[in-house]
Image (spheres, helix red, strand yellow):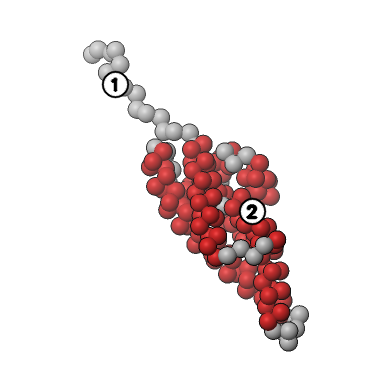
């Protein structure tokens, strides 16, 4: 499945996105880079406008350089955020009694930030969001991660060895 189909599945069927926990980690990393790029495309214009209003002497040569550095910083922030969310996911999986390892939780976390990242990035276009909005972003991401972990089938319990059989 392509990362664009994965994006559409995350946007339309968050519970079905729990199946992405089995995909290769490289695909999940590519997906995280795509989310960072989408966020950068929505966030960078406001910051570029602010930068040029403060320093009108800057030429347009610096815009691509600024965008590249902005994307690198956004990607780094996304990977740190996904990793921290994955650690919280390990606590959620214990609470929900699901069998997941860290890699699967990391994949679910990368998919769980899809809606929050796009909503807050697009919101930034219309209104400059204060830094305190990171807390609703984290809460929204945790809720999405909870939904995805909840959708993971539970572990099968061991059969009861004394279920009517006598030796």
Q: Is residue 63 visible?
A: yes
**Residue placed farthest to the bottom in the image?**
57
**For marks 2 and 1 on the same chain, the one whose residue lies earlier in the sequence:** 2
Q: Residue at x 68, y 81 (%)?
A: 54
State the quadrant of the C terminus.
top left
Which label number is shown at residue 161? 1
| 134 or 2: nearer the viewer | 134
Q: Position of residue 17 (x, y in %)?
A: 58, 42
Instruction: Determine the residue positioned at 63% across, 71% down.
Output: 70
Q: Residue at x 51, y 46 (%)?
A: 143
- Which quadrant of the structure image shows residue 93? top left
Judge whether 50 appears above or below 161 on screen. Answer: below
In the rendered view, does 96 fall on the left or right side of 3?
A: left
Q: Judging from the image, what secondary structure is the residue with disc 2 in? A: helix
Cα distance, mark 2 to mark 1? 51 Å
Q: How many marks?
A: 2
Q: Position of residue 10 (x, y in %)?
A: 62, 45
* Of residues 73 and 49, the one drawn nearer to the viewer in this rendering: 49
- Asked whether the beta carbons under mark 2 and mark 1 sit within 8 Å of each other, the answer is no
Q: Is 43 displayed left or right of 132 in the figure?
A: right
**Comparing labels 2 and 1, the label whose residue is closer to the camera:** 2
Question: At numbered mark 1, what does the secondary structure look like: helix, strand or loop?
Answer: loop
Query: Residue 57 location, x and y as percent?
Result: 73, 87
Where the N terminus falls, by quadrant? top right
Residue at the left extreme? 167
Q: State whether residue 22 appears in this view.
A: no
* Residue drawn at 41 percent across, 48 percent down: 90
Crowding around mark 1 (Cα neighbors within 10 Å: few <14, some 14 to 19, many 20+) is: few
Callout 2 crowding tier (Cα within 10 Å): few <14, some 14–19, many ≥20: few
Q: Nearer the viewer, residue 109 or 137?
A: 137
Q: Which residue is mark 2?
A: 119
């Amino acid at each position: 499945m392509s990362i664009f189909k994965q994006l559409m599945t995350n946007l339309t069927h968050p519970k079905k996105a729990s199946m992405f926990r089995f995909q290769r980690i490289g695909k999940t990393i590519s997906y995280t880079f795509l989310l960072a790029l989408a966020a950068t495309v929505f966030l960078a214009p406001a910051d570029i406008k602010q930068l040029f209003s403060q320093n009108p002497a800057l030429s347009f040569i610096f815009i691509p350089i600024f965008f590249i550095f902005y994307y690198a910083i956004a990607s780094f922030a996304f990977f740190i955020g996904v990793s921290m969310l994955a650690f919280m996911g390990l606590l959620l999986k214990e609470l929900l009694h699901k069998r997941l390892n860290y890699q699967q939780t990391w994949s679910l976390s990368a998919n769980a930030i899809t809606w929050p990242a796009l909503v807050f990035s697009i919101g930034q276009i219309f209104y400059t969001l204060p830094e305190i909005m990171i807390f609703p972003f984290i809460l929204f991401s945790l809720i999405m991660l909870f939904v995805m972990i909840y959708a993971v089938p539970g572990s099968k319990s061991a059969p009861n060895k004394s279920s009517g059989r006598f030796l």
